[in-house]
Image: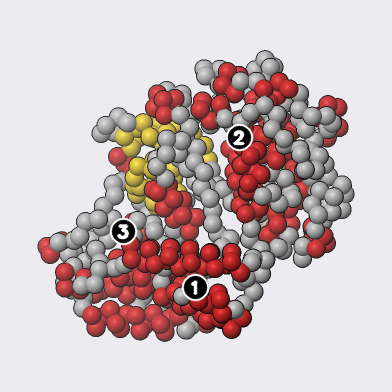
Amino acid sequence: MAIAGAGQLNLHESPCWGSRSVDCFEKLEQISEGTYGQVYMAREIKTGEIVALKKIRMDNERGFPITAIREIKILKKLHHENVIKLKESVTSQGAKDEQGRPGKCCPIPINNLLLGATKYSPAVDMWSVGCIFAELLHGKLIFPGKDEPEQLNKIFELCGAPDEVNWPGVSKIPWYNNFKPTRPMKRRLREALGNQEKAPATATTRRKGQTTEITAFTASCRLPPIQSGQAHAQMRPGPNPPLHGSQPPVAAGPGHHHGKPRGPAGGPGRYPANGTNGGFNHQNHGGGYSSGPYPPQGRGAPYGSSGMPGAGPRGSGGSGYGVGAPNYSQDGPTEVLVLDVALT
Amino acid sequence: SNETDGNSIPEMIALGLEIYKNLGYYAILKRPSKDYMKTVQIDINVEMRASLINLLVRVTEMKKLLLRPETLCLTVSYIDRYLSNISINSQQLQLLGLACMMIAWKYVSLKATPKVPVWCHVTGKSYLKDEMLQMESAVLYHLKYEMAVPTAYNFLRHVVWVAETRDRDHLLQLKCL
């Protein structure tokens, strides 16, 4: 950190924050639009380096969003090959941009707490981790509720409604009776997320290789609190881990479609989760989904081979990664997990 | 205190010790320079800082801002960390104080912060919105976005917790101190 020298004091100059202007970069195309701003593929004019430029929306009324502060801070701390590196932050007029490869900051729905539980336990954290994995798979927020009741409803729609059978003790949680769903809802997480073909366009090779594991974990991230120890066991790869040992039955999907031919990612209709209330077409998928264990090939298929998108179809437009940007395909995953700790 | 609900006493002891150690570690790591008034600053002095802090204490007492007690501690910590590295002039000192308080407010409270113009006019002096936003960015940048630092408030809370628990369980007290 530079210390201003004796001669550097200047009453008329805005405070020096030593960072460059966003004009040092040439925006090539918009990669995506996140919760907090747009992400562009850009080229540093001086060096030609391809970077991702994430524009943080400054709240003109309230200044720098606290979520962005956390995101930058955490990104600066993370040094891992699978985590995108924040290179620098640059400014544009009146706004603050952040350059690096894009991060993803997601509000984390926490089921127990939404229902009024006050004890913050490992189960709550495991839920959060599961949500993040699910969002990585899904490519967008999985529970995009505008308020708490709506958020809970979205959770119930995807994960099934909690009751004393699948979550002993749930009826004692303070707000359970206020929020419990009026109609029965079945768990359909695996149907919504279990299909690798649906992995987001931003997915990259290395991450895709791990999707099966992640999916298994996602599926196990169910309403009843799970112990972290169990969760770790579930994350381990391997044929048929005892996912359902002591857990309530889950509507198991037909594996992850490893063996099926991979076409281009489907149209928008294939992601029902963002739809509003109801309307999930359980019946349409119903047949083989709701019963029976995983077909062996679901878990046993080599993660690498069929999971790799390689040069395969990525879905039509909008997939910025890898297109004309050699850096991305070499560097592997560029998604970031940012845990929002706002609930402490 | 209901903070021990759901956790056993040994768990609480272990957690408490861990938290306390961690607080101490970061408090030292993020400690502002002791003599920045001499070594870094030119235009401001100790008295100016003191009157700024007094002013901020009065701001803290303003009901409309709904400040929580730790906000002031964090604000002072941000000010000192900023001034440890960046020389500013006396005209900007109050702006710095308010920008730091605005950030601390955001960090501490879960509610939306008062709008920037409120901060600009909270003291007799008026600043422009852009000035406030620029100062905010400058503080964040120079503090490396590391805004969660332990303050006296955290330590005090910890001590109070131990003191409260002491009446209930002497063993806990002995192990925690």
The residue beneath circle 3 is B142
Q: Amino acid at mark 2?
A: Arg
Coordinates of residue B70 in the picture (x, y in percent): 47, 74
Coordinates of residue A295 in the picture (x, y in percent): 76, 23
Out of B165 and A30, give the one closest to the viewer. Answer: B165
Q: Quadrant of residue B125?
A: bottom left
Query: From what the image shows, is residue B133 above or below residue A235?
Result: below
Out of A246 and A289, give the one closest to the viewer. Answer: A246
The subunit letter for the residue under badge 3 reads B
Out of A32 and A284, give the one closest to the viewer. Answer: A284
> Is the residue marked by circle 2 packed among few (<14), some (14-19), or many (20+) residues within 10 Å?
few
Disc 3 versus disc 2: distance between alpha carbons?
42 Å
Closer to the camera: disc 3 or disc 1?
Answer: 1
Coordinates of residue A132 in the picture (x, y in percent): 59, 43
The secondary element bearing badge 3 is classed as helix
Disc 2 versus disc 1: distance between alpha carbons?
37 Å
The residue beneath circle 2 is A236
Q: Residue at x 72, y 36 (%)?
A: A243
The image quadrant where one finds the N terminus of chain A is: bottom left
Q: Amino acid at mark 3?
A: His
* A103 relative position to A25: left or right: right
Q: Amino acid at mark 1?
A: Cys
The residue beneath circle 1 is B176
In primary-sequence order, the first of circles 3 and 1 is: 3
Q: Residue at x 70, y 38 (%)?
A: A219
The secondary element bearing badge 1 is classed as helix
Q: Quadrant of residue A79?
A: top left
Q: Residue at x 57, y 30 (%)?
A: A210
